[in-house]
Image: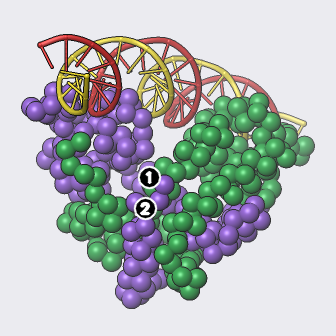
Chain colours: A purple, B green, C yellow, D red
Amino acid sequence: MAKRTPSAQELHRRAVATYVKAGGEESVQRVITAVQSLTKKLDQWYARQLVDLEVTAGEWAVVTSLAKAGEALTPSQLAELTNVAPSSMTHRLDKLAERGLIERTPDAENRTRIYVSLTDAGWQLFSVAIRGSDVVESDVLQDLSDDERGELARLLEVVIARLDDIDA
Amino acid sequence: MAKRTPSAQELHRRAVATYVKAGGEESVQRVITAVQSLTKKLDQWYARQLVDLEVTAGEWAVVTSLAKAGEALTPSQLAELTNVAPSSMTHRLDKLAERGLIERTPDAENRTRIYVSLTDAGWQLFSVAIRGSDVVESDVLQDLSDDERGELARLLEVVIARLDDIDA
DNA sequence: TACGAAGTCTTCGATATCGAAATATTAGCA
DNA sequence: TGCTAATATTTCGATATCGAAGACTTCGTA
């Protein structure tokens, strides 16, 4: 390769500069860009871990959504939560059901509706994957003290509290 | 729908609790989960904006990568940057070239290599989209003071500086 | 120079995703 | 009740993506 790959830090600086030049506000772009770069890098690591578990990113999104919800969800809700078309969910659930990770239960009260829930095997897969990724995530945050982590989390949570009020 | 959709804040709390229960560390999961939820929500908004511009998320990833790089990139580099298989990039670039947003230039020194660059139309599209999304992003951060935005950016940049040293 | 290994992009067949239409059920209301 | 609209899932055809293999070029080294 002709040029050495620039550091993540350098890429971040360039990205912010580019967005500002294109008309973005600096104080906004510094935050948003940082969040995006972090997610992109994390996604690359998750992708590798998922290969080992023989689960696609889309299937994993379904498993985590169910785990986080703590209750059964419908295919449409899962499609919304995982940013995918409802029609795509059908096949995805088929594959997950084949592997015994989820199960579909018809709603007795509304026969157009189906509830999807994690099986024990699904929970087990979730737990194994989380413990694996927690190791990497821990490494990523190693330069932040406990106080700084708390402050970072607090600031992000302020932003999250605002999310529902926008657009609608 | 049977139950009201829970707030983003409530979803975040549940998510952290779930990850901790599955074996994750709380100070880590509070941060990582917050970053993920924020990105997911942003992605949903970007998706709508991109529909208006008649660009897919994958095509947009190529445009931003080129804009941020500030120089021509090869298809492999673009595939790496946008988390996609190299073979998928071929067709994506075909579509972008058809629309006149990018152009391919063979490398004179190494004939196996092709350089991809943004056309003027490509830059223009980028600029329009950034100015549009900056509005939403500004709204998202409206509850943070300038000092808080600076602190949030600083903390995230500390994390980013660590990214390259992990895994390799 | 010669030749095998490595690098880069594309092609190919299989699979996943999308948006629109089809199917079926439920809700609202005259 | 009966009719229309809304809701929820699936089916279908077109397109996008993937991993493996192919075609070509360059590199390393004897």
Q: Which residue is mark 2?
A: A165
Q: Is residue B65 above or below residue D12?
A: below
How many numbered marks, from 0 up? 2
Chain identity of mark 1: A
Chain identity of mark 2: A
Task: Say whether residue B145 is left or right of residue A151.
Answer: right
Task: Say whether residue A84 is left or right of residue B52.
Answer: left
Kind of residue at badge 2: Asp
Q: Quarter of the image holding residue D26?
A: top right
Q: Quarter of the image holding residue A136?
A: bottom left
Where's the N terminus of chain B, which quadrant? top left
Specify whether residue B114 is in view.
Answer: no
Q: Is residue A147 above or below residue A125?
A: below
> Please, what secondary structure does the residue beneath circle 1 have?
loop
The residue sitting at 15% across, 31% down in the picture is A110
The percent position of residue B99, horizontal first and vertical second, equals: 76, 33
| Number of other residues with Cα within 10 Å of mark 2, as a class: few under 14, some 14 to 19, many 20 or more | few
The percent position of residue B130, horizontal first and vertical second, equals: 68, 56
The percent position of residue B35, horizontal first and vertical second, equals: 44, 66
| Number of other residues with Cα within 10 Å of mark 1, as a class: few under 14, some 14 to 19, many 20 or more | few
The residue sitting at 63% across, 68% down in the picture is A29
Kind of residue at badge 1: Ala
Q: CA distance from mark 2 to mark 1?
A: 7 Å
The percent position of residue B16, horizontal first and vertical second, equals: 28, 67
Q: Which residue is mark 1?
A: A168
Of A76 and D2, the residue lying toward us: D2
Task: Say whether residue B102 is left or right of residue A112.
Answer: right
Mark sitting on residue B112: none
| Residue that protrudes farthest toward the left in the picture | A108
Of B23 and B150, the residue lying toward us: B150
- Do callouts 2 and 1 mark residues in contact (Cβ within 8 Å)? yes
Task: Say whether residue B127 is left or right of residue B81.
Answer: right
